Image (cartoon, grey):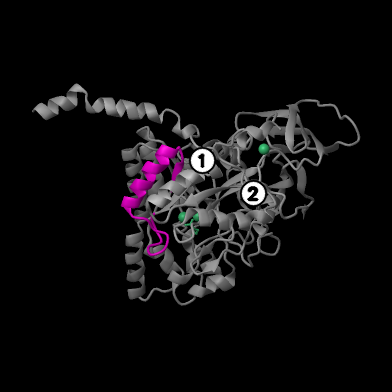
Amino acid sequence: HPAHEFCAAGGDASGCGGGGGGDGTRILIKGGTVVNAHRAEEADVYIEDGVVVAVRPNIPVGDDNVRVIDATGKYVMPGGIDPHTHLEMEFMGTVTIDDFFSGHAAALAGGTTMHIDFVIPVNGNLTAGLESYRHKATKAAMDYGFHMAITKWNDEIAREMELMVKEHGINSFKFFMAYKGSLMVTDDLLLQGLQKCKSLGALAMVHAENGDAVAEGQQRMIDLGITGPEGHALSRPPVLEGEATARAIRLAKFINTPLYVVHVMSVDAMEEIAKAKREGQRVIGEPVVSGLVLDDSWLWDPDFTIASKYVMSPPIREAGHGKALQAALSSGILQLVGTDHCTFNSTQKAFGSDDFRKIPNGVNGLEERMHIIWDSMVETGKISVTDYVRVTSTECAKIFNIFPRKGAILEGSDADIIIINPKRSFVMGAHTHHSRSDTNVYEGRKGKGMVEITISRGRVVWEDGVLNIAPGLGRYIRMPPFGYVFDGIEKSDAAYRASLRAPVHRGKAAA
Ligand code: URP
Ligand code: ZN
Ligand code: ZN
Ligand code: ZN
């Protein structure tokens, strides 16, 4: 099948990720506006066996075995790809409530057809971590890929990183600069990690907050008697996110390797990324939906169940940060939108009812992302429909090196497709969502634009408000190293080495 070149030899137990279900399903989507990141056009889309076979106007309806979907007046787009989720993640003494099935149900109902989840090593061991996540993902209902966190450092872990890239289809590693005492890494480890990532052509990702200062800030709040959810935001202000973002950017510059900053939540962090980009550095900034459209006032709600659901790290900021992040997204300073979907129900959140430090960190968003970005950014004219596709799907596929199999509606692409009706409206909330959580940070939110149909791997899985999915239908998508962000790095390395022996340096030595 056309996508096969993406599957490396010696496949995982989780299977090769090529093509659709192979069940012969044939679909013709007629009369819609097909939107790719590079252009929008009036065209029909013909799908067979999980793969896009043709995209052009006036494709004739062939035989009776082809299902015809009328998309007149609607947008036909690549399914969303969420670069940042935590399904069934063990964290802060508990486990996130959405697993690879309920999370996928939520995603598909909201127009997202692929996500990349973070494998957390087991006692620092990457192989054990991968094994655990492979097992969790056997119930997958849609396609998924993995990033991997690095939480410890030794020669064995460095060797395992190589194995992850060369054998297991992982091309990105995340370093937590926060969560002191659990996931946090030191600058020493970060430097080693950046170096290793560079040599493997893997993208280094950072959770950028100064974890030592956060611990100080938390103690300061407790000493002041501030123990409620608002203490979470007060203890880790934007300056700590700005500092860590700047530090990671400078260390990546020193190593000369690309850097991906996850969940950019503040103007402070965004400005550091903007500055680095102006200077030509390869830095990718990922805002998340909660940071774009919510503000921290909820943390002061007198009802703990309400306030605690907004606790995530870095914190949701004061009003104003979200608007600035939206502007940065529309102007290209920030490049793609994630969710950091990391759901805990109200019982789990209540672990911290007398101490904000014990509230499990994380918010929902996997089901809401596509609708909220459409409503808040396309409906308001902040971004075009083509840019919508870019920031919700195509850019992620390109960065993680799976484009154009994913992130596009082109001949040979996987048939992960959504149909949005711009005239219909949505209302969000825990009573109607597909997440297992009993709360939703977007409770009662209304807006325009509705994902009416989701097609995953060539099958209609969401239609008329009904899901038709099964565990095990999703496939692991291998992501090869040396994606476009690495292109040319070796040339700037060579230029740097040459500059060390240039006359200006020799002159300095002589003086
Ligand atoms: O609060 C958050 N963000 N929870 C998930 C873990 C992380 O830092 O991404
Ligand atoms: Zn294959
Ligand atoms: Zn994080
Ligand atoms: Zn996260």
- The local secondary structure at tag 2 comes to loop
Start and end of the magenta stretch?
A: 177-205
In the shown orientation, is residue 410 left or right of residue 387?
Answer: right
Q: Residue at x 47, y 68 (%)?
A: 300
Figure quadrant of residue 497: top left
Give the position of the C terminus as an image quadrant. top left
Q: Is residue 29 above or below residue 154?
A: above
> Picture coordinates of residue 502 (x, y %)?
21, 23
Whether residue 258 is visible, yes or no, is: no
Q: Which mark is residue 14?
A: 2
Q: Residue at x 49, y 63 (%)?
A: 361
Rounded to the nearest angstrom, the CA distance separating label 1 from label 2 is 16 Å
Q: Residue at x 72, y 49 (%)?
A: 473
Circles 1 and 2: CB atoms closer than 8 Å: no
Figure quadrant of residue 98: bottom right
In the shown orientation, is residue 192 left or right of residue 317?
Answer: left
The residue indicated by pointer 1 is: 166
**Which is nearer the N-term, disc 1 or disc 2?**
2
Q: Residue furthest right?
A: 64
Confirm or reject: label 2 Cβ below 8 Å from ligand 2.
Answer: no
Closer to us: 189 or 331: 189
- The three-letter code of the residue at mark 1 reads Lys
> Picture coordinates of residue 238 (x, y %)?
38, 55
Q: Is residue 240 above or below residue 330?
A: below
In the shown orientation, is residue 87 left or right of residue 2?
Answer: left
Closer to us: 291 or 409: 409
Figure quadrant of residue 274: top left
Badge 1 crowding class, 10 Å Cα cut-off, few under 14, some 14 to 19, many 20 or more, is some
Closer to us: 88 or 294: 88
- The local secondary structure at tag 1 comes to helix
Give the position of the N terminus as an image quadrant. top right
Q: Is residue 181 magenta?
A: yes
